[in-house]
Amino acid sequence: MTTDTAHVIATATTTRENFYVAMTRGADGNYAYVVLDRPDDSHGVPHPSDNPDATARSVLYGVIQHIGAELSAHEAITAEQERWSNIGQLAAEYETIAQAAQHDRWAGLFAVAGLTVEQVDAVLDSDAYPALSAELRHAEANHHNLDTLPPRLIAARGLDDADDIASVIHARIARATTRPAGSGRTRKPPRLIAGLLPYAEGPMADDMRQALDERHELIEARAEAVLAGALADKALWTAQLGPEPKDLNQGKAWRRAAVVVAAYRDRYQVTDDQTPLGPPPQNTRQKIDRASSDQWPPRASSSRRRSPGRKSTAPAPKPHGGNSTPAHRRRRPGTR
């Protein structure tokens, strides 16, 4: 049945099939009204799946992913494999393992940084501790000295009046590590897995190290596979990366940068095929990863850079929505 205009109410429980049918009934126009409201306190306890930060875009993305039709056995197996092998899942596993593996190291670091035993326990028990642990990994991946940085930041101003010590330390470290350590030619590239995920360093149990290394390899292999598949399928977003340069060093730099874009798309399930990085980020973590992915056009390493006067081959255009500011001068999103 068709009509002049169709008006559809879409909620988080709407299936993709029903949404498609409803949005194709109008001959002159089809309009979707996305429900974001949550029940007030008088309607009982909200469902655990309710998202207070939901947007129209995020709800509609969930609708598109919500398949109501029953899958065949082969489709079900493929979907399950995809669910557990994508970078979003592997990155979450890596960060969870890293947090547990580095627990004792961070506890010792806080103790020698000037915190009392009670304050150390409060930090480790805080809801802000996972974010603090991730921030410490990010700082170390950017070659900041964690033996000197936390003590200096803690000593700069007391923590006796802090409501949440972990949150305060996290904010101080984030501000202090806006830029990577070093400058000019002394600056080292950050240690990031697939260009996005900070590498977990330091002493830890052997089984933890093995688990992290396994996921490290899986993440990078997945990123390479996603890029290879997109190039083979001639996905529209790859066209904006430009052709792979024929020069050996420039070609390697192009592929490294392209792999990071592929990893970003897979981690955040970007389905927009018109632009490499898709729609604007939804949270601080994604903003940081987007900044890491937005390094286009790539540059060959300084030790292998072409000789002066030699023209580059087929420079790639910058992806849509890129930032032309050099990476070393950008501020990390979410910091002041």
Image: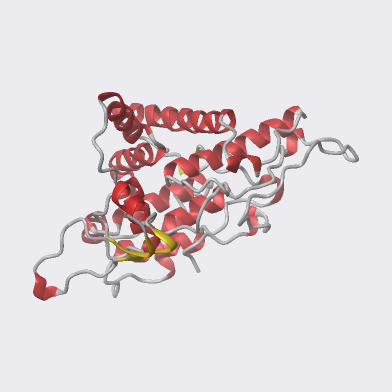
- Residue at (21, 60) in percent of width and height: 118
User: Measured from the top left, where is residue 84 in percent x and y?
Assistant: 32, 33
Q: Is residue 188 visible?
A: yes
In this image, 43 relative to 102: left or right?
left
Q: Quadrant of residue 199?
A: top left
Query: Is 189 in front, or is 155?
Result: 189
Q: Looking at the picture, does residue 179 appear above or below residue 99? A: below
- Residue at (49, 54) in percent of width and height: 288
Q: Looking at the picture, does residue 111 appear above or below residue 75? A: below
User: Measured from the top left, where is residue 33 in percent x and y?
Assistant: 34, 67
Q: Quadrant of residue 132?
A: bottom left
Query: Is 192 in front, or is 5?
Result: 5
- Colour mapping used in the image: secondary structure
Q: Residue furthest top?
A: 74
Q: Is residue 113 visible?
A: no
In this image, 12 relative to 333: left or right?
left
User: Measured from the top left, where is residue 177 in percent x and y?
Assistant: 51, 57
User: Measured from the top left, where is residue 308 in percent x and y?
Assistant: 88, 40
In this image, 65 relative to 217: left or right?
left
Q: Looking at the picture, does residue 10 appear above or below residue 276? A: below
Query: Is 123 in front, or is 325?
Result: 325
Query: Is 182 in front, or is 306?
Result: 306
Give the tally of numbered discs: 0
Q: Residue furthest right?
A: 309
In what quadrant of the picture does the N terminus appear?
bottom left
- Residue at (58, 28) in percent of width and height: 232
